[in-house]
Image (cartoon, rainbow, N blue to C red):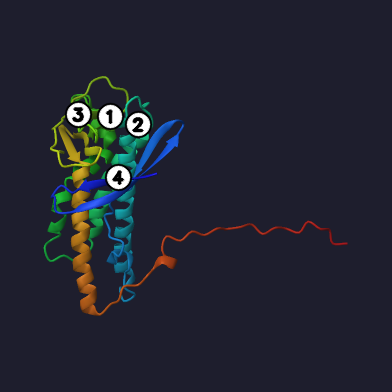
Amino acid sequence: RLIFLRKILAHKTATILIPTRCRQANGTSICLIRKMKILSEKSIFKYLPLEMNGYQRLIFDTIRITFEMIEYDYELLENELHHLSQEKTKKEHTSRTFSHAWGIIDHSSRLIKLFQKLPSDSEHSILNPILSVNAFRNTIQHLHERIDESMIENKSPFYGILSWYHKNLETEKLTPKILVSGITWAFNANLTIPDVSDSSKEINDICLQTVNKKETILINLTDLMQKLKSIADKNEEKVGAFFKEQGWKPCDWTKRKDIMINIKSEEKNNTDNN
């Protein structure tokens, strides 16, 4: 069945209906939350003009794919945390949960580098709100070094700590949740109770905590998604206006993008030729 949840954006300027499909698996109800897309359905990143040169088209299309990877990782992360937040739920798939969280960091850092390859009249200042992901990207790239530098001293688990707040939509009770990667021997977790009085979501303020050399760092992944959405919206508008000025028309690449090829073996004729 479909349950429609009302999601109110942090800036309270828009309301979006988000369908959530629930199904039964081994007697357990699993809700698959359908997320707001970063790119709009008619995004210019999905309809690149034929007049673009190959280099430009490659960068813009890679940006499109990277945005979609981030969307997918966040959707799966939120679904995992939703499942873990239910009463009497058995803890499982912890490694998969952290994989989604770090995937968002990895793809967001890559997105910054892709945008920096494009011309900018503001030295890419539009990316400033998400540059903090680079410190997390550096940590995941040098985790083996962080063990000797600070992980023992800071009591930091190898793949960090995830925290979020589960809101019971019936009672409006807010419950902090913490998921620690690996064998827990000691850890320090930073929690700040968010104002979710207007939120109609069960999962709120997903945060990832780790170390950057000797410093404990924390990033709000939910907030990061909103910032990525803002960057996408502004670029769609600006790039779309530029293409229009050039007289370039959007092109539907549906039949030529993300293609799948099935290769079948030729069946041999085993009949003897006498």
The CA span between labels 1 and 2 is 8 Å
Q: Which residue is mark 2?
A: 94
Q: Which residue is mark 1?
A: 179
Mark before the other along the chain sequence, 2 or 4: 4
Coordinates of residue 175 in the picture (x, y in percent): 21, 29
Q: Residue furthest bottom?
A: 247
The CA span between labels 3 and 4 is 28 Å
SS at mark 2 in the image: helix
SS at mark 3 in the image: helix
Mark before the other along the chain sequence, 1 or 4: 4
How many residues crowd around disc 3 within 10 Å: few (fewer than 14), some, or many (20 or more)? Answer: some
* Near-viewer residue (106 or 153): 106
- The quarter holding residue 76 reads top left
- Tell whether label 2 touches label 1 (CB within 8 Å): yes
Q: Which residue is mark 3?
A: 150
Mark before the other along the chain sequence, 3 or 4: 4
Q: Which residue is mark 4?
A: 74
Tell me the quadrant of the picture where the C terminus can be found. Answer: bottom right
Coordinates of residue 46 in the picture (x, y in percent): 33, 64
Mark before the other along the chain sequence, 3 or 1: 3
The CA span between labels 1 and 4 is 16 Å
Coordinates of residue 92 in the picture (x, y in percent): 38, 29
How many residues crowd around disc 4 within 10 Å: few (fewer than 14), some, or many (20 or more)? Answer: many
- Label 1 is placed on what type of residue? Leu
Coordinates of residue 142 in the picture (x, y in percent): 26, 38
